[in-house]
Image (cartoon, rainbow, N blue to C red):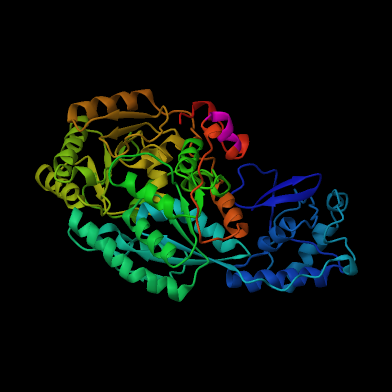
Amino acid sequence: MKVWSEEGRIRQISKALPLWNRGYVGLTYCGEAAFPAYCRVVEEVFARQGDAAVAENVVAHLADTGVEVSVGDISGVGWHEVDTPEERQRAEEAILADPRFLKAPRAPGVSDRPLEHVAPLQPLAPRRRICVFIINRANYGRLKPLLTAIRNHPNLELQIVVGSSMLLYRFGKGADIMEADGFRIDARVYMHVDGENPETMAKSIGLGLVELPGIFGRLKPDIVLVNADRYETLVAAIAAASMNIPVAHTLGGEITGTIDESIRHAVTKLAHLHFPAHDAAARRIVQMGEDPDHVHRVGNPALDVIAGMELRLDIADFWKRNGGVGQPIDLEKPYILCVQHPVTSEYGKNYSHMLETLEALDILQVPVILLWPNNDAGSDEVSKAMRFFRENRRPAHMHFFRTLSVEDFIRVLANSHCIVGNSSSGIMEAGFLGIPAVNVGTRQAGRERGVNVIDVGCDRHEIALAVRDQMRRGPHPRDTYYGDGCSAERIVRVIAEARLESQKQFIELPQSARSATILTELLGNASRIKHASDVIL
């Protein structure tokens, strides 16, 4: 567990800390006088978190509530495995006999305070129930760090509702991956109408609106949290807002192509708490009449996964866990990751667009990992092109997967030499990793992007040339425009403490606010907006 300490006292303790100067080994020393008070904190943490509570949650609670917890240096003492009373006694004797521990900087923290000076704990307040709606594999991947942070927070109760393609085998049935990761699913919404065309997508919206209100009525969440711009996201936002349940929205304020653009901004107008990834997105949300006090630029929580994991790809282990279709490819050689989804506003053209990408990859003759598309209108067109190409060409250098776990996807991306397609991962996650990306078509039109991205049309020769160029250039420096890997902790702090109101009001920007300077002040000065001089209103 990562720890940041100053003057010998713990200031922060979390697995997600970007900077740390100590490590917590699970051992806490508490003086006899303060032990009853420490026990009360342990009981409170267990009451709030149940069996998920661990020792560091107690330390984090003490540090977060202002109790000064000192730290001791036990470097060189060695690791003491403690499973029995005898082992604990031997470990304690070894540590207490070390002069470095006795000389460690001491603060008047919980271990030193007499019992009568420890303030009594207040009665337990009801935990705030946060219901998160998960609808596909990308959605889960981007929210997984946030789910963990909510579950670990002593004042929050995590509720998970899964729906749409998360429950469907042909899209990887991500609900099974979630449960294997240790998350409890509180409700399932079977809302996907087969067909993957505009009509069935609209019907899926209607079916979701029939099902979700009953689930929200049963779970009684204090906040419904939704992500980005999927049509299922809109369903949850409509249902929650109609039931006077505040809505929290991550990754609002972006600009892209397809129906996602309209859905994203519609969800913004239904949401009460906004968590955009970057400054420009925050400005757009305020321009839409949202209260600047409710707009919190936090970054993309998907990047938290990258910041906190080992990125080395164990190739043998990867193939053991993931089957897929096609001949195994040599991942020791430079390879390409391809993720291409349908463009809903170009329904009827997605088959030919996907074929152009596949032809480009065939020209290159480089090993390729391809992932199945999402379930938007046009999904059948994309998947049909992939099946046709696979069965008729039988390319030995391509391997196809329905889905990958969050961690496997990140490792495959991090070790690739280029990502090709129209997924936002080529802009956000690949930018953070410095992986070259070739963005195909209009799906990401207008979205801010870094130097790692080359934009091309749906033409095989243009795509192939761009990929060759990107692979020749090699990796780029890390781009933190979309976040620094600590977004989940920021979001959790806000939703745990925010004043909840279901009634919204359009905030009219005064005429004087139509300048970059005033808009910057509305959004909280430099803490939220770094490039206000670029604002055009």
User: Residue 218: horizontal and vertical position, in percent?
Assistant: 44, 76
- In the rendered structure, which segment of residues is drawn in magenta? 515-521
Q: Is residue 513 visible to the viewer in this orientation of the structure?
A: yes
User: Residue 95: horizontal and vertical position, in percent?
Assistant: 80, 58
410 and 523: which is toward the camera: 523
- Res 81 quadrant in image: bottom right
392 and 115: which is toward the camera: 115
User: Residue 115: horizontal and vertical position, in percent?
Assistant: 88, 69
Q: Give the side of residue 356 with respect to residue 466, left or right.
A: left
Q: Main secondary structure of the magenta part?
A: helix
Q: Give the side of residue 19 with respect to residue 299, left or right.
A: right
Q: Residue at x 21, y 51 (%)?
A: 379
- Res 440 quadrant in image: top left
Q: Give the side of residue 59 with respect to residue 186, left or right.
A: right
Q: Which residue is drawn at 51% across and 48% down?
A: 275
Q: In the rendered image of this protein, does residue 428 appear above or below residue 502? A: above
User: Residue 445: horizontal and vertical position, in percent?
Assistant: 31, 35
Q: In the rendered image of this protein, does residue 317 appear above or below residue 363? A: below
Q: Which residue is drawn at 39% across and 47% down?
A: 265
Does the segment drawn in magenta span residue 302?
Answer: no
The residue lying furthest to the bottom in this view is: 218
Q: In the rendered image of this protein, does residue 502 appear above or below residue 366? A: below
Q: Give the side of residue 222 with respect to residue 115, left or right.
A: left
Does the segment drawn in magenta span residue 519?
Answer: yes
The residue lying furthest to the left in this view is: 392
420 and 490: which is toward the camera: 490
